[in-house]
Structures are given as structure tokens and as C-alpha cells.
Image: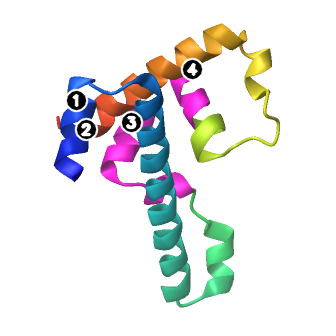
């Protein structure tokens, strides 16, 4: 099943909505894995009081693929990914100050394609 999804992602045989839902699922898995790693590091630390001054960003716990995506993406795509999937905003119309609704959906579709390219591409 997993290889089927990867093959369809790489060949772009899915609709934009299906690709978006796939990216959303991948981000949820990455967030869960990163939070779990951070929590395990906190539990295994010898001195919890000294760790609070050195709390690492969640970015440090993402997989190599996710870190590559965040480094290689364009600024606008990274902002959409961050506000839409990684750190959802309370304001449902956060993109209104960024661009119009149609432009937002075009940029979101470009972000999804960019995400899939960098996440599944092995350098």
C-alpha cells in the first residue's frame, strides 16, 4: 500500500485534493513522531531543570526527509505549510493578508507538489 501511494505521488496520478490529504497525513505522522522523540529525550534527561533552558525546537526532531522539505521549499510554500498543517492558526482566514482566496489555493497546490517532490525524492 505504501509503495502504491509513493508511486502515485511521484507520477502525480492523484487529484489535488487527494495529494493535499496525503501531505496532511504525512505532516501529522511527522509531528507525532517528532513530539514523541522530544518527549522521550525529556524523560531520559538526567537533569530536567537544566533541559528547560535548552528546549530544542520541534524542527530538530523531524525526519531527514521532512527537514529537507523545510529547507528546500520556497518561502511562501513554507509559510503555507507551517500555518496550514504544522502549526495551525486559530484564524481560519490567516491567508487573507497574504493573498486572495484563488491565489492562496493556487499556491497551496504548488506547495503540495513541492512538498511531495522534496519528501519522496532521494538525493
Residue 18 versus residue 48 in the image, above or below: above
The x and y percentages for residue 78 are 53, 29
**Label 3 – label 4 distance at C-alpha:** 13 Å
Residue 7 versus residue 77 in the image, above or below: below
Q: Are marks 2 and 1 in contact (CB under 8 Å)?
A: yes
Identify the image quadrant of residue 103: top right
Q: Nearer the viewer, residue 70 or 15?
A: 15
Q: Nearer the viewer, residue 64 or 85?
A: 85
The x and y percentages for residue 109 are 48, 20
The x and y percentages for residue 35 are 53, 66
**Label 3 – label 2 distance at C-alpha:** 9 Å
User: Which residue is tagged 1?
Assistant: 10
Which residue is situated farthest in the right direction here? Answer: 91
Q: Label 3: state its secondary structure.
A: helix
User: Which residue is tagged 3?
Assistant: 69
Q: Give the crowd class for mark 1: few <14, some 14-19, many >=20 residues within 10 Å.
A: some
Q: Earlier in the sequence, mark 2 or mark 1?
A: 1
Which residue is situated farthest in the bottom direction here? Answer: 46
Labelled disc at residue 120:
2
Amino acid at each position: 500500500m505504501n509503495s502504491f501511494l509513493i508511486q502515485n505521488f511521484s507520477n502525480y496520478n492523484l487529484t489535488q485534493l487527494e495529494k493535499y490529504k496525503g501531505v496532511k497525513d504525512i505532516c501529522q505522522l511527522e509531528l507525532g513522531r517528532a513530539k514523541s522523540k522530544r518527549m522521550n529525550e525529556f524523560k531520559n534527561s538526567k537533569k530536567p531543570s537544566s533541559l528547560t533552558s535548552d528546549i530544542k525546537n520541534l524542527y530538530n526532531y523531524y525526519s531527514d526527509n521532512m527537514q529537507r522539505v523545510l529547507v528546500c521549499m520556497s518561502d511562501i510554500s513554507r509559510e503555507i505549510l507551517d500555518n496550514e498543517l504544522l502549526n495551525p492558526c486559530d484564524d481560519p482566514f490567516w491567508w487573507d493578508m497574504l493573498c486572495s482566496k484563488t491565489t492562496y489555493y493556487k499556491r497551496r497546490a504548488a506547495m503540495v507538489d513541492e512538498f511531495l517532490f522534496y519528501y519522496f525524492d532521494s538525493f
